[in-house]
Amino acid sequence: MTNLKPKILVVDDERLNIRLLYEGLRDEYQILASSTGMDALRIANTELPDLILLDIGLDDISGHDVCTQLKSNELTKNIPIIFVTAQDTYEDELKGLELGAIDYFRKPFSIPLVRVRVRNQIELKRKTDMLQYLSSIDGLTGLANRRQFDEHLVNTIRYADRQHRGLCLLMIDIDRFKQYNDLYGHVRGDDALKVVSRVLTKGAGRPMDFVARFGGEEFIILLTDSSPEEGALVAEKIREQVEQLHIPHEGCEFGFLSVSVGVAYTKPDIGEHIDERAFVEHADTCLYFAKESGRNRVICENFELHRPIKK
């Protein structure tokens, strides 16, 4: 059974303090524990806790150093940190807050007070996470939006550069969508966007595949650890599945709703960096050729994979 309790990482070099916090918080939270700074960094990177209660005076590296490293790591920078310490000077508290901690309480601590402050911070993080999620999702289709795609592309390119892995980018456009809206209305148009988005999500079904609404009637798919052939196969599968829906579209030369797809591929050599802008432009250029050469087809690296039969 999945544990849905928020995760709290308690970092303290005194077992008694860990035990006290564990006993005081375990009914509401999943408690992780560490007695060293380096171990805390490892746990934070692998478990991604919702909150860290961090002692300053650790045996190996200071809590301040742990906080600095967490805040400089893209993966852990948004995890809220509360310093728990016996130090009680104004300067100590100020330094912790300047490093990015959100709160500060002193030993010996009051468990009822700790529970209230922890609960407030967990609730604040939950709301912040929800707002961040909503800001990255397309409200109509439920897919990632352009903003989230741009962020994901940057991170994926970093990975591909480091590991020298291949990436495929699929740019998908619903053919003559303006005419579809004009003929059938925007409500039917919205329904068509939702249907196509479901086809894309099903077609790009691997865990690392990323589907987003790029804007208007355009969608984009990023395939990580893929080859040109894999990108072409996914694109053709999507084109076929949209065609097989047989959604009437009298404003299109085929008589039904269809999509055109452009596929770009890149794989960096050692020491090379993928040009993010050129990669997207390449996919867009392939899409342009797919539409210019008759629509309802896939163009990958400037060669045609499908030639549809016109009605």
Image (cartoon, rainbow, N blue to C red):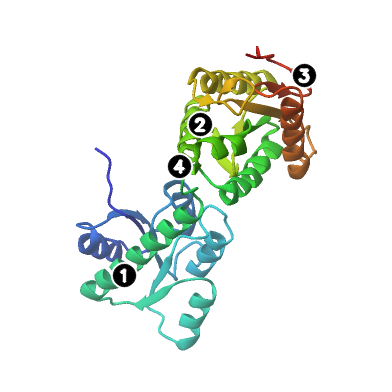
Q: Nearer the viewer, residue 149 or 196?
A: 196
Q: Nearer the viewer, residue 187 or 262?
A: 187
Q: Which mark is on residue 187?
A: 4
Q: How many marks?
A: 4
> Is residue 11 visible in this depiction of the protein?
no
Badges 1 and 4: C-beta atoms under 8 Å apart? no
Residue 284 position in % (x across, y down): 73, 36
Q: Amino acid at mark 2?
A: Val
Q: Which residue is mark 2?
A: 196
Q: Amino acid at mark 4?
A: Val
The residues bearing labels 2 and 1 have C-alpha atoms spaced at a distance of 41 Å
Q: Earlier in the sequence, mark 1 or mark 3?
A: 1
Q: Which mark is on residue 302?
A: none
Q: Label 3: how many residues lie within 10 Å, few (<14), some (14-19) or many (20+)? A: few
Q: Amino acid at mark 1?
A: Asn
Q: Secondary structure at mark 1?
A: helix
Q: Secondary structure at mark 2?
A: helix
Observer-side mark, 3 or 4, equals 4
The residues bearing labels 2 and 3 have C-alpha atoms spaced at a distance of 24 Å
Q: Which residue is mark 1?
A: 120
The residues bearing labels 1 and 3 have C-alpha atoms spaced at a distance of 57 Å
Q: Earlier in the sequence, mark 2 or mark 4?
A: 4
**Residue at the location (49% across, 24% down)?**
247
Q: Which mark is on residue 303?
A: 3
